[in-house]
Amino acid sequence: MSVVYSRDWGTIDFGNQYVRPDWSEARIGYVRSSVQVDRFGDVPCRILPETAATKHDHRALTYWTGQAAIWWVAKNGHILREWESRIGPGGEQHADAIYRKDSIDLTVDKGASEKRTTVFPANGMKPIDDQFQPMFLDGKVLQPKRSMDVLDPFTGGFEHWSVSSVGPFKGATMNISFEGQTFEMQRGKESQVV
């Protein structure tokens, strides 16, 4: 999926002067994701790889930042492992999280330095595993609202998210009809409808 900034306006009348219609578009990044069937050790699971990049224009400097992440998730929704890489002006860093029954083993490396720690989530593992439990299946809303904790593997901290069902949507793109369910995701004061 490409991330695009677009601008579209018609003729603007300033009284004695007209500004012509304008439509412009700039590609500012992309997101790619997929689902694959595999095993983590002897546990059957699904692998969810995702990559993303964003173009930044800052004064006379243009640069890209990137992120890649892979989750290994058991069929019951329990996260088994998470690996993440971030690339930016400050360099490249990697994080690897192994999810245990009641803890998470973290390894973070940036260049030559490596840090290891074990995190014991205060709310237990269920709010973390809730990230990969279905809320919508076969055209039906299974759970209209959910709260979850999302690990930042680089800090070992958690962000609290809530997701609420907003309602169905129908639409068409390039004469192809789509329909599904719309959800609102909230993190702190930020909100996004997907």
Image (cartoon, rainbow, N blue to C red):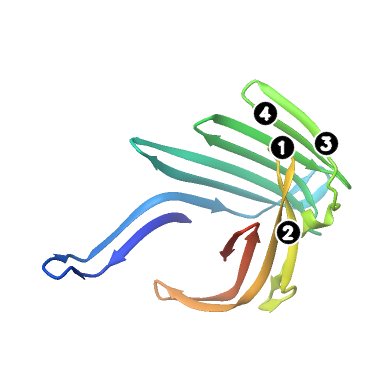
Q: Nearer the viewer, mark 3 or mark 1?
A: 3
Q: Upstream in the sequence, badge 4 or badge 3?
A: 4
Q: Mark 1 points at which residue?
A: 96
How far apart are the alpha carbons under marks 1 and 4? Answer: 9 Å
Q: Mark 2 points at which residue?
A: 132
In this picture, residue 82 sits left or right of residue 51: right
Height in image: 2 above or below 57? Answer: below
Q: Is mark 1 on a helix, strand or loop?
A: strand
In this orientation, which residue lies closer to the viewer: 74 or 148? 148
Question: Residue at image x 47%, y 50%?
Answer: 30
The spot of residue 66 in percent (x, y) is 52, 41
How far apart are the alpha carbons under marks 4 and 3? Answer: 15 Å
Q: Upstream in the sequence, badge 3 or badge 1?
A: 1
Q: Is mark 4 on a helix, strand or loop?
A: strand
Q: Upstream in the sequence, badge 3 or badge 2?
A: 3
Height in image: 10 above or below 51? Answer: below
Which kind of residue does numbered mark 3 sit on?
A: Thr
Q: Upstream in the sequence, badge 1 or badge 4?
A: 1
